Image (cartoon, rainbow, N blue to C red):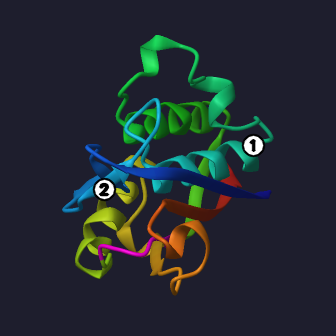
Amino acid sequence: MFRVGIGHDTHRLSEGRPLVLGGVRLESDRGAEGHSDADALAHAVTDAVLGAMCEGDIGVYFPDSDPRWRGADSLQLLARVMWLAKERGYRVVNVDSTVLLERPKLRPYVDEMRARLAEVLGVEVERVSVKAKSGEGLDAVGEWRAVTAHAVVLLEKQ
C-alpha cells in the first residue's frame, strides 16, 4: 500500500534571525521567524509525512505553545516523525519539494539540503528532490518578506 502526503509551510523573514532550510544554515541578511528554527523546508516535509499517515500536521506534535520546542532543530522534529512512521510500518519511497525564496540563490545549498533530509528520512539522496524558485518580485516571497516550501512524500507500507 502506498500513501501520499502534501506539506506546506511559510515563514515571515526578518533581520537578526538565521535562515535555515533543509537543515542547512544559509548566508543571508534575513532569516525566518518562528518558534523553532523556522526551517520551512523541513516543516513542509514533516507535514507531508504526517499527512500521508493521516496524522495531522506539525503543530499537533510540536505546538508553538510548548516551550520545549522553542529554537528546536527542525530536522530533529522530522526525525521524531520518521520514528513514528517506522513504528507504523512505513518507509519513504521519495520526496519532491520546492522552496520559494527571492534571495539568496539556493543552488549552492541544494545538494547539502538533499543529503541532510535524506539522512533523516532514511533514504538515498537520489530519492529526495529539492527545487528552488524565486517570487519574480511578486507577493511576499518576491518582495523578500517570506519563505515558502511545498513537499510531496510517497510512503510505502511494509
**Magenta-colored span:** 98-104
| Secondary structure type for disc 1 | loop
| Residue lying at 48% horizontally and 81% vertically, measured from the top left | 134
| Residue lying at 61% horizontally and 63% vertically, measured from the top left | 151
Res 51 visible: yes
Quadrant containing the N terminus in the rendered view: bottom right
Looking at the picture, does residue 144 appear above or below residue 84? below
Q: Name the residue under label 2.
A: 30
Say what amino acid the circle numbered 1 marks.
Met
Q: Which residue lies furthest to the left in this view?
A: 27
Which label number is shown at residue 7?
A: none
Residue 81 is a magenta residue: no
Q: Where does the image place residue 93, in percent across and percent down from the top left?
A: 58, 64
Image-based side of 118 in relation to 145, left or right: left
Q: Where does the image place residue 114, in percent across and percent down from the top left?
A: 36, 66
Say what amino acid the circle numbered 2 marks.
Arg
Looking at the picture, does residue 134 appear above or below residue 101? below
| Secondary structure type for disc 2 | strand
Residue 101 is a magenta residue: yes
| Residue lying at 49% horizontally and 30% vertically, measured from the top left | 80
In this view, the residue in front, 58 or 96, is 58
Looking at the picture, does residue 11 appear above or below residue 50? below
Looking at the picture, does residue 40 appear above or below residue 89? below
| Residue lying at 55% horizontally and 62% vertically, measured from the top left | 148
Q: Where does the image place residue 132, in percent across and percent down from the top left?
A: 45, 78
Earlier residue among tags 1 and 2: 2
Q: Name the residue under label 1.
A: 53
Counting other residues with Cα less than 10 Å from the Cα at mark 1, is it few (<14), some (14-19), or many (20 or more)?
Answer: some
Res 119 visible: no
In this view, the residue in front, 10 or 139, is 139
- The Cα atoms of the two marked residues, 1 and 2, are separated by 34 Å
